[in-house]
Image (cartoon, rainbow, N blue to C red):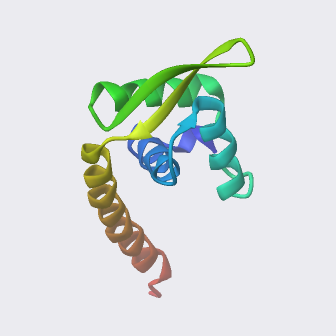
Amino acid sequence: MRSELGNSQIDLMLLAVLEAGPSHGYGVIVALRERSSGTFDLPEGTVYPALHRLEAAGLVASSRTTVSGRQRRTYMLTSRGRQALARRREDWRRTANGVHAVLSATQ
């Protein structure tokens, strides 16, 4: 299903996952897969560039920690990220409702 998703949908889902609290990249991947019942099992090569894009936009911040001797980057929403999530969530609802209306219409 990844090929059907654009950056804006991926970004929206990543922001929503991080709304629950800070997480390292692999934790974001697992949460996305679990929340979607396996529908969105995105590879690292999709998720990490998206997290970096969100960080560059100021919507996500990250910090480095060491766990069991391994460096790990933890991502969290910024206040700008929370505001963007609220706007994007509402935009998505309007879009989904519009698509649903078109698909449900009888001729």
- Picture coordinates of residue 27 (x, y %)? 65, 38
- The image shows residue 73, relative to residue 82, as above or below, that is above
- The image shows residue 96, relative to residue 4, as above or below, that is below
- The image shows residue 16, relative to residue 45, as above or below, that is below
The picture quadrant where one finds residue 24 is top right
Q: Nearer the viewer, residue 95 or 89?
A: 89
- Picture coordinates of residue 35 (x, y %)? 65, 57
Q: Is residue 35 left or right of residue 82?
A: right
Q: Is residue 4 left or right of residue 53?
A: right
Q: Is residue 78 left or right of residue 62?
A: left
Q: For the image shown, how many numbered marks are present on the structure?
A: 0
The picture quadrant where one finds residue 51 is top left
Which residue is depicted at the point 71% across and 53% down?
34
- Picture coordinates of residue 18 (x, y %)? 49, 46
The C terminus lies in quadrant: bottom left
Which residue is depicted at the point 66% across and 32% down?
26
- Picture coordinates of residue 93 (x, y %)? 37, 69
The N terminus lies in quadrant: top right
Q: Nearer the viewer, residue 28 or 10?
A: 28
Which residue is depicted at the point 35% across and 65% down?
95
